[in-house]
Image (cartoon, rainbow, N blue to C red):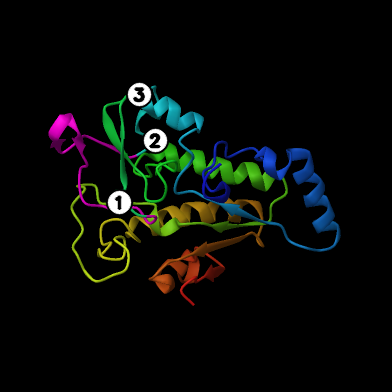
């Protein structure tokens, strides 16, 4: 387990270190008996590199070949070292690209290399994650806190990001993340997630964190996406 469990190996199970599904059902019954709502941390941006989807994607198995963001090397340096497609940086430092020798391509990870980013430009991925939400709603969850949703989409052309602050203390903060953070398509996915919850309960709740343009992503009128925002910058 890396990153405190945010590298998810199975979206429909409980990591053994936290307990079992039976434990989860016991928790659900206990909190609901006391009139407490149960909100689940939901991480739609990435999975673990040990997830079955990623393992099959490495092997280009259908339909998983494009479940993640794969890109060819820009070229090869000394000793045939593959050169990343662009200058994108991981939130945790270093390149946001990791070379996979078996597939002979780079995969994107905006966080740890053990957390490959899912490809939301593939409609199958969106349907998979909507089904994951439905699974947990069926288990008794009342709502979700969506983690790292601002990272769901990246520039299709993989353009380099511009330097905005050469004096920033970390390399991630040096770049203007115009092509990797809070792209307009994020809102479309949040609307799809909202539909899943609305079909289950009028009181179903969805939370999202770390969105700069939070009023836009909150939505308005009939297109409201979220009921509560968590702003870590505050």
When asked about the image quadrant of residue 17, the answer is top right
Left-right relation of 60 to 176? right
Q: CA distance from mark 2 to mark 1?
A: 14 Å
Left-right relation of 197 to 84? right
Marks 3 and 1, the one that precedes in the sequence: 3
Q: Which disc is residue 67 wearing?
A: 2
User: Considering only vertical position in the picture, is 82 above or below 111?
Assistant: above
User: Considering only vertical position in the picture, is 69 above or below 161?
Assistant: above
Q: Position of residue 208 (x, y in %)?
A: 51, 63
When asked about the image quadrant of residue 219, the answer is bottom left
The residue tagged 1 is 154
Q: Is residue 148 magenta?
A: no
Q: CA distance from mark 3 to mark 1?
A: 21 Å
Kindly identify the residue that appears in the image at 49 percent across and 64 percent down: 209
The residue tagged 3 is 60
User: Considering only vertical position in the picture, is 21 above or below 58?
Assistant: below
Badge 1 element: loop
Residue segment shown in magenta: 69-92
Residues tagged 2 and 3 counted as in contact (Cβ below 8 A): no
Badge 3 element: loop
Q: Nearer the viewer, residue 16 or 205?
A: 16
């Amino acid at each position: 387990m890396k990153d405190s469990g945010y590298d998810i190996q199975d979206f429909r199970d409980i990591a053994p270190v936290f307990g079992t599904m039976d434990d989860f059902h016991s928790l659900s019954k206990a909190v609901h008996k006391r009139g407490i709502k149960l909100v689940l941390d939901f991480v739609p941006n990435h999975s673990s590199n040990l997830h079955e989807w990623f393992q099959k994607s490495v092997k280009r198995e259908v339909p998983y070949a494009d479940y993640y963001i794969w890109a060819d090397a820009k070229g090869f340096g000394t000793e045939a070292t593959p050169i990343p497609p662009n200058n994108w940086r991981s939130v945790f430092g270093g390149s946001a690209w990791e070379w996979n020798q078996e597939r002979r391509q780079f995969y994107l990870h905006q966080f740890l290399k053990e957390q490959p980013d899912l490809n939301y430009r593939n409609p199958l991925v969106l349907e998979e994650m909507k089904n994951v939400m439905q699974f947990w709603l069926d288990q008794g969850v009342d709502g979700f806190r969506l983690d790292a949703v601002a990272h769901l989409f990246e520039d299709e052309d993989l353009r380099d990001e511009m330097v905005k602050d050469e004096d920033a203390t970390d390399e991630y903060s040096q770049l203007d993340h115009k092509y990797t953070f809070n792209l307009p398509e994020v809102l479309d996915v949040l609307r799809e997630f909202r539909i899943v919850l609305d079909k289950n309960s009028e009181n179903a709740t969805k939370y999202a964190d770390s969105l700069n343009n939070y009023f836009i992503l909150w939505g308005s009128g009939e297109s409201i996406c979220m009921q509560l925002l968590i702003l870590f910058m505050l």
